[in-house]
Image: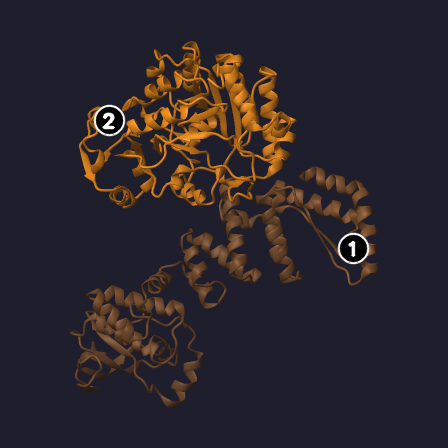
Chain colours: A brown, B orange
């Protein structure tokens, strides 16, 4: 490898890790771009870098470490990709000695990212995983995490560490703010394909955490009861028709999907609710009377609320209540529940 | 399940009952200062509930042996009394609420029978106009202890010499052999929890089959014991109505209607915390995915019309065989009673009165003596 010759070398003994690094022009072919061990960033695009590198050159050289076949990237994955795209066959890089251990390399890689910008959850997870993978003991891992501004609290750091082991679509869901950490971890317990379908569903419907949890519970329990998979359920015609209707408002889609799943999970309860609404409609309660059934029709006590502003309003409501008492629909309502 | 670990509280290490149980179990024991040490041993297991079923803790009951059944004001309770001889069970029913009732659940047995009998003497020894219905099968199965203890013999003999209380031994086992030659004087009711073959096979692990339970009941009948049956929990599934009807037909083919003191019906209900236990311990069970609502007592139960529908069919079937059977609903409200049975407890003087009357009739109870 010509890059390992002494040509183009500039040795610098003063590095943060206490090890000697040298600046050296390296052939692109000697850089292993497939080895993502030290990759922290989740940014894949390089367009923002192309212009700047073309105009001003590579101001901050990538950091590489020697491996038996060439070089492993420690910092600068995007910079190297941008240079390659610009057709540069050789770039100047900082080369770490072989003696630099992987824990030090990991810290360098994390610092390169974390000290420039806030890491997102996936990047933080990758950073913590790097320290876990290469840190010799808990004490050193913890000290390094603290120095690099990574979370060190037990439960949070434990939860965040799991993220980079989740299926990629779930990680994507976090990056696009479709799901939060809590939902990501919940989806992480499912089959990857199921998790992928759910992230897609949540993204299509743009639902918040509470609604996501409700939908997930309905889907899981229907699937359990009917002995089908969640992807099979989502792929069914009834749901796909709603999800794929382009002209349908997203709020309407959300409502339709939720109603469909709830009706399928609780057929008797939703039927009773529909019947109740039908009978109440016949009572023509108007806007100033509200009739509230027992919760889940389990108890026997109904509640009625009245809205009035004056004596005349109340008198009118009194007449209306008399009508309600005599109405056959009230008998249907009470007989069903009492 | 087999008992694999025996813990003995230091205070009862030399108790004759402890020695007797240990010699029958043929297990070495670990002596502990308190229950906490047992809890810690059980809690560290991968499946603490299962471990609790294999771990027997012999100790002393420092509280009352007789307890009131924990009812709720929202539903009609039968005013039953629990005789707390021990807790938990080595059988393994999916729906068992004891999995979360004790923290953690362990098979616990109280060896201080002298205190138990003294308390019974105080309660049963005095003349009263109140009938007591007392059972050992609420916090445990009444007959699982037969292999290692003489508790049923002791209790049956004690109840036999009084006239205002009945003892109900409720079980899913067939451990009846030692009841055979006891002088019970009709004051002990042999009772079985019944279910369909499908539920027994899929949800009631390590319990006796339906055939075996009915056969055991028939044998107890020949020994003169009054009988009782509990269809609790009734579980909804496709074809359940037909299956429950078949169970009732088989029941009346095996025992005489006139010897049945009461039959209780109760649909599946459970505290919400059980759901995650079932999902974890019994991932193949689907019973928690029916249409449940949370009742005012905080327990999950089937949507009311579904309960009523099942009760109606079962009640009709029972009445076809035994029009005068004392059938009652466990923890249901007046609406469900009226729609399922055609009356409410108040119409017959209240549920306790209804059951007392049936107990008096079948068990030859005499008040004021």
Residue A319 located left or right of residue B109: right
- Asked whether A210 or B307 is in front, the reply is B307
Task: Measure the alpha-carbon separation of dots 1 and 2.
Answer: 73 Å
Residue B74 located left or right of residue B175: right
- Asked whether B148 or B53 is in front, the reply is B148
Q: Which residue is mark 1?
A: A286
Q: Is residue A233 above or below residue A114?
A: above
Q: Is residue B45 above or below residue A42?
A: above
- Asked whether A306 or B193 is in front, the reply is A306
Query: Quadrant of the rendered structure where residue A69 is?
Result: bottom left
Q: Residue at x 80, y 62 (%)?
A: A310
Which callout, 1 or 2, points to the residue nearer the camera?
Answer: 2
Task: Look at the image and tell me whether residue B142 can be seen.
Answer: no
Query: Quadrant of the rendered structure where residue A188 is?
Result: bottom left
Q: Which residue is mark 2?
A: B17
Residue B66 located left or right of residue A309: left
- Asked if marks 1 and 2 fall on the same chain, the answer is no
Judged from this view, the residue extending furthest toward the bottom is A56
Residue A153 located left or right of residue A241: left
Number of numbered discs overlaid on the protein picture: 2
CB within 8 Å, label 1 to label 2: no
Circle 1 SS class: loop
Q: Position of residue B101 (x, y in %)?
A: 40, 40
Q: Position of residue A230 (x, y in %)?
A: 50, 48
Query: Quadrant of the rendered structure where residue B180 is?
Result: top left
Q: Residue at x 41, y 61 (%)?
A: A168
Q: Position of residue B281 (x, y in %)?
A: 38, 40
The C terminus of chain A is located in which quarter?
Answer: top right
Category of crowding for the residue at label 2, using alpha-carbon neighbours closer than 10 angstroms: few (below 14), some (14–19), many (at least 20): some
């Amino acid at each position: 490898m010509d890059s390992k010759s002494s040509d183009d070398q500039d040795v610098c003994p003063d590095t943060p890790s206490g090890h000697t690094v040298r600046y050296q022009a390296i052939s692109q072919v000697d850089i292993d771009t497939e080895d993502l061990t030290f990759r922290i960033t989740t940014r894949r695009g390089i367009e923002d870098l192309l212009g700047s590198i073309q105009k001003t050159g590579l101001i901050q050289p990538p950091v590489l470490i020697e491996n038996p076949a060439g070089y492993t990237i420690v910092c600068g994955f995007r910079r190297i990709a941008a240079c390659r795209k610009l057709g540069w066959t050789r770039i100047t890089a900082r080369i770490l000695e072989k003696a630099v251990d992987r824990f030090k390399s990991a810290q360098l890689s994390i610092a390169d990212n974390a000290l420039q910008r806030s890491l997102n959850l996936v990047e933080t997870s990758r950073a913590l995983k790097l320290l876990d993978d290469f840190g010799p003991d808990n004490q050193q891992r913890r000290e390094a995490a603290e120095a690099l501004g990574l979370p060190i609290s037990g439960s949070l750091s434990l939860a965040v560490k799991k993220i980079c082991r989740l299926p990629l679509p779930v990680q994507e869901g976090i990056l696009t703010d479709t799901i939060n950490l809590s939902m990501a971890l919940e989806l992480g317990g499912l089959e990857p394909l199921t998790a992928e379908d759910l992230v897609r569903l949540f993204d299509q419907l743009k639902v918040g955490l509470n609604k996501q949890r409700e939908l997930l519970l309905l889907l899981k329990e229907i699937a359990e009861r009917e002995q089908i998979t969640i992807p099979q359920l989502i792929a069914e015609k009834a749901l796909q028709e709603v999800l794929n209707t382009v002209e349908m408002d997203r709020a309407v889609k959300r409502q339709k999907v939720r109603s469909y799943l709830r009706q399928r999970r609780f057929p008797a309860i939703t039927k009773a609710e529909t019947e109740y609404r039908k009978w109440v409609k016949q009572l023509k309660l108007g806007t100033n009377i509200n009739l509230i059934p027992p919760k889940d029709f389990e108890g026997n006590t109904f509640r009625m609320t009245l809205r009035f502003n004056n004596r005349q309003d109340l008198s009118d409501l009194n007449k209306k209540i008399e009508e309600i008492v005599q109405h056959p629909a009230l008998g249907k309502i009470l007989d069903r529940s009492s | 399940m087999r008992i694999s670990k025996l813990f003995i509280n230091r205070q009862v290490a030399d108790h004759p009952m402890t020695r007797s149980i240990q010699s029958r179990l043929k297990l070495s024991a670990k002596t502990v200062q308190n229950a906490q040490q047992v809890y810690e041993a059980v809690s560290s297991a991968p499946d603490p509930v299962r471990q609790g079923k294999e771990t027997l803790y012999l100790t002393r009951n420092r509280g009352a042996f007789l307890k009131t059944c924990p009812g709720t004001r929202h539903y009609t309770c039968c005013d039953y009394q629990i005789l707390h001889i021990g807790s938990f069970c080595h059988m393994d029913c999916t729906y068992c609420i004891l999995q979360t009732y004790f923290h953690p659940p362990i098979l616990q047995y109280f060896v201080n029978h002298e205190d138990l009998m003294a308390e019974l003497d105080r309660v049963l020894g005095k003349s009263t106009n109140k009938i007591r219905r007392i059972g050992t099968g609420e916090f445990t199965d009444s007959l699982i202890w037969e292999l290692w203890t003489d508790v049923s013999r002791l209790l049956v003999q004690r109840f036999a010499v009084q006239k205002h209380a009945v003892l109900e031994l409720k079980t899913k086992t067939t451990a009846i052999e030692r009841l055979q030659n006891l002088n019970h004087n009709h004051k002990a009711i042999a009772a079985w929890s019944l279910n369909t073959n499908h539920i027994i096979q899929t949800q009631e692990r390590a319990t006796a089959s339906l055939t075996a339970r009915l056969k055991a009941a028939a044998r107890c009948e020949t020994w003169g014991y009054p009988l009782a049956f509990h269809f609790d929990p009734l579980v909804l599934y496709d074809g359940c109505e037909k299956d429950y009807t078949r169970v009732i037909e088989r029941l009346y083919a095996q025992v005489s209607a006139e010897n049945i003191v009461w039959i209780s019906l109760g649909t599946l209900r459970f505290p919400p915390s059980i759901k995650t236990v079932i999902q974890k311990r019994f991932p193949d069970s689907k019973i928690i995915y029916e249409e449940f609502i949370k009742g005012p007592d905080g327990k999950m139960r089937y949507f009311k019309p579904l309960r009523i529908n099942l009760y109606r069919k079962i009640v009709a079937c029972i009445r076809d065989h035994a029009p005068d059977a004392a059938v009652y609903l466990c923890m249901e409200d007046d609406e469900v009673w009226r729609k399922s049975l055609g009356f409410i407890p108040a119409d017959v003087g209240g549920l306790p009165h209804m059951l007392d009357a049936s107990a008096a009739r079948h068990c030859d109870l005499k008040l004021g003596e």
